[in-house]
Image (cartoon, rainbow, N blue to C red):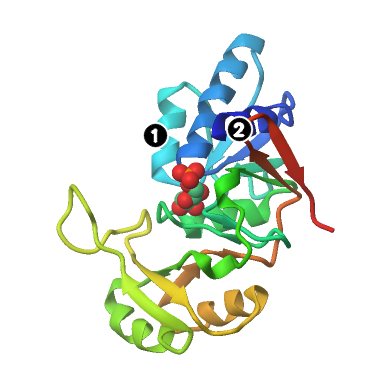
Amino acid sequence: MRKRAAQAALELVLDGMVLGLGSGSTAEIFTRLLADRVAEEALDIIVVPTSAGIERVALDLGLQVSSLNEYPEPDLAVDGADAVDKDLNLVKGGGACLAREKAVDYAAKRFVVIVDERKLVSRLFEVPVPVEVMPCAWRAAEQVLRRFGTPRLRLSSQGKYGPIVTDNGNFVIDLEVSADVPPTELEIELNAVPGVVENGIFSRRRPDEVIVGTPTGTKRLKPT
Ligand code: A5P
């Protein structure tokens, strides 16, 4: 299902584009398909990665890698998501790459999300919202986040003892939201908490399209 969505997104890629490259397993499938197409068709594509993880994959595949500072407005960003609601609000950050993902995805001229159908949710906050916080302020931030629900510091499950550390050197608190606040407001409110760097609600710049991989094909969701 993820591959079907990635293949459909690949059709949106045109020669000469600067592409924001998302993070996570679906974005990685897209990146591998992209590298094959770039090689087969000798395309001139520059990619702007949203994480050290996808940057490594892109470099290994021989893609031309650059940065958001060099290309502040990529032509197209293609990224995965952890949850998509009917209004195309997203929750992202399951891979702890939310801050750079938001910087790239929000800056792109066109933003396309690729997911499998299990990511479609009836209530956006069925999944916890990842919140990136400064290590020196995580406990203070956690106290304030309790106003909105139940916060849990994300711990590493392998390779490191203790909290996971993002590409930016920060921690992640997963917030199970219980407050009844619309996504667009909560996205702003969470970022106003001292110590918070960014949160994984993507509602202020909705995707231009969500491509959903299903067991038999794809379906395309567009904002109404
Ligand atoms: C990375 O921080 C995330 O935002 C991913 O884009 C998201 O978790 C989707 O990942 P999968 O494609 O692996 O489900």
Q: Is residue 70 visible?
A: no
| Res 11 visible | yes
Outermost residue toward the top in this view: 40
The N terminus appears in which quarter of the rendering? top right
Q: CA distance from mark 2 to mark 1?
A: 30 Å
Residue closest to the far right: 224
> Label 1, on which residue?
56
Type of the residue with mark 2: Pro
Left/right of residue 120 with respect to residue 94 in the rendered view: right
Q: Is residue 122 left or right of residue 57?
A: right
Where is the C terminus found, in terms of image quarters?
bottom right
Residue at the disc numbered 2: 215
- The picture places residue 148, in percent across and down from the top left corner, at 48, 84
SS of the residue under disc 2: loop
Report crowding for label 1: few under 14, some 14 to 19, many 20 or more residues within 10 A (C-alpha): few
| Some atom of ligand 1 lies within 8 Å of the CB belonging to the residue at label 2 | no
Residue 120: mark in rendering? none
> Looking at this rendering, what residue extends furthest in the left direction?
161
- Amino acid under label 1? Arg
Q: Mark 2 or 1 closer to N-term? A: 1
SS for tag 1? helix
In front of the other: 224 or 15: 224
The mark closer to the camera, 2 or 1, is: 2
Question: Number of labelled discs?
Answer: 2
Query: Which residue is depicted at the point 64% across and 43% down?
Result: 77
Question: In screen coordinates, is 162 left or right of 9?
Answer: left
Q: Is residue 106 above or below residue 45?
A: below
Q: Where residue 2 appears, x then y in whole percent?
A: 55, 35
Q: Which of the 4 image quadrants contains residue 87?
A: bottom right
Tell me the residue at 69%/34% (across/down). 218
Identify the residue at image location x=66%, y=22%: 44
